[in-house]
Image: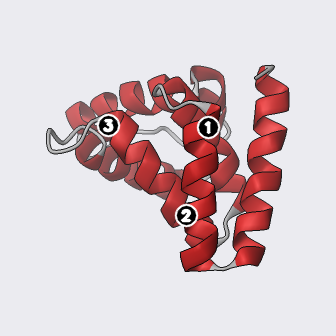
Amino acid sequence: MTRAFAPKNPELFDQGLATRREVLGAAYVDASINNATDFNIDMQELVTQYCWGDIWNRPGLDRRTRSFLNLAMITALNRPHELKLHVRGAINNGLTKDEIKEVLLQAAIYCGVPAGIDSFRVASEVFKEMGI
């Protein structure tokens, strides 16, 4: 990071950082923050505070349910890099390989087979990396 970083809402940022680390893994999250530049540090702050601090910590849904939703939505958007992170996060949040398969099958029907095929490819890579 090339400038001093001072989040606008340190309490929400810290809450989001803790949740983000628990779901995605501390190594990945810390690298994202520590390698941020003047150009993208504001995006890291936005994601950490509002996505992870505010939304992921709301009481209305548990983390497993949020992971189910994220897998389906990220498949719909066909974003393999983010899907890879969230497959790992879904495992960390207690989803099984079979549950992930069912989410991806459902998403393939409603979001398109090409997106589903890519999602299965990405999920398989994560399972292999994690020894699942």
| Distance Cα–Cα, label 2 vs label 3 | 34 Å
Q: Nearer the viewer, residue 10 or 120?
A: 120
Kindly identify which numbered label has been placed on residue 20: none
Residue 25, above or below 56: above
Kindly identify which numbered label has been placed on residue 98: 1
Residue tagged 3: 13
Residue tagged 2: 106
Residue 55 x/y as whole percent: 26, 49
Question: Few, some or many C-alpha atoms within 10 Å of disc 1 (few <14, some 14-19, many ≥20)?
Answer: few
**Residue shown at 53% from the left, 36% from the top:** 90
Question: Few, some or many C-alpha atoms within 10 Å of disc 3 (few <14, some 14-19, many ≥20)?
Answer: many
Say what secondary structure mark 3 lies in.
helix
Q: Nearer the viewer, residue 18 or 86?
A: 86
**Mark 1: amino acid:** Asp
In terms of sequence position, does the residue under pointer 2 or pointer 3 come before the other? 3
Contact check, label 1 and label 3, Cβ < 8 Å? no
In terms of sequence position, does the residue under pointer 2 or pointer 1 come before the other? 1
Say what secondary structure mark 1 lies in.
helix
Residue 12 placement, left or right of 112: left
Residue 79 placement, left or right of 40: right
